[in-house]
Image (cartoon, rainbow, N blue to C red):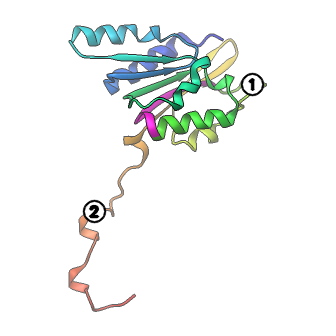
Amino acid sequence: MTYPANLFFDIETLVNVAQAEQILVLGDNLPSFLDNYVAQKALLNQQCQVTHLANADLDQLWLEETRYDVAIVANLFEHLDKAKGMQVLSRLRDVLCPQYCICLPLNKTGNASEWQLTDLFSFALSKVASYMQDGVEYGLFKYNINDYKKTPDWLNSDNWANPQMWGKYWW
């Protein structure tokens, strides 16, 4: 399965915005699309390490204890059943990294996972872009803990206590 070329450009843009130093790449796509980013970091004398786990090595994900800045997942979820894919997303979100992006086919029928948009949104993923390649629609989704929930206006120290009302009303 070939992914659209502009997908990898958009992923590299997301990584560049994050200024990641530790990158985890999951799936059977080679992380060579990050070569420009790694070279750019080297020119700036900044460290950048890319770790790649192919589909066959996915069991090592549960042994991984390194905290990554960004994870990139492509060409993986269409080869996993949905329950295993949800475990991978949970592991990435809860343990391994504060932000990640995933790409998977959206309208391809007959694959093992059959992901729906609501499944992806339930993991707090937001849709970045859609791509068409050989009649298959691919979606790029991202998760960032900093964008997950905005702090509401009422959650500030002004509303935490009313000392002038202390002891006047009991509710």
Query: Visible in this render: residue 139?
Result: no
Secondary structure state at the residue bearing disc 1: loop
Q: In this view, does 120 lie above or below 157?
A: above
Reading the image, the residue beneath label 1 is: 111
> Residue 10, how many percent across, how many down?
45, 19
Whether pointer 2 and pointer 1 mark residues with C-beta atoms closer than 8 Å, the reply is: no
Give how far across and how far down residue 8 sits, in percent. 48, 15
* Residue 140 located left or right of residue 118: left
In the rendered structure, the answer to whether residue 101 lies left or right of residue 169 reads: right
The answer to which image quadrant residue 123 occupies is top right
The answer to which quarter of the image holds residue 171 is: bottom left
Residue located 72% across and 31% down the image: 114
Q: Give the range drawn in magenta.
A: 95-105
Horizontal and vertical percent position of residue 167: 27, 90
Amino acid of disc 2: Asn
The residue beneath circle 2 is 156
Q: What amino acid type should be assigned to the residue bearing mark 1?
A: Asn
Assess disc 1: are there few (<14), some (14-19) or many (≥20) residues with their C-alpha within 10 Å of its C-alpha: some
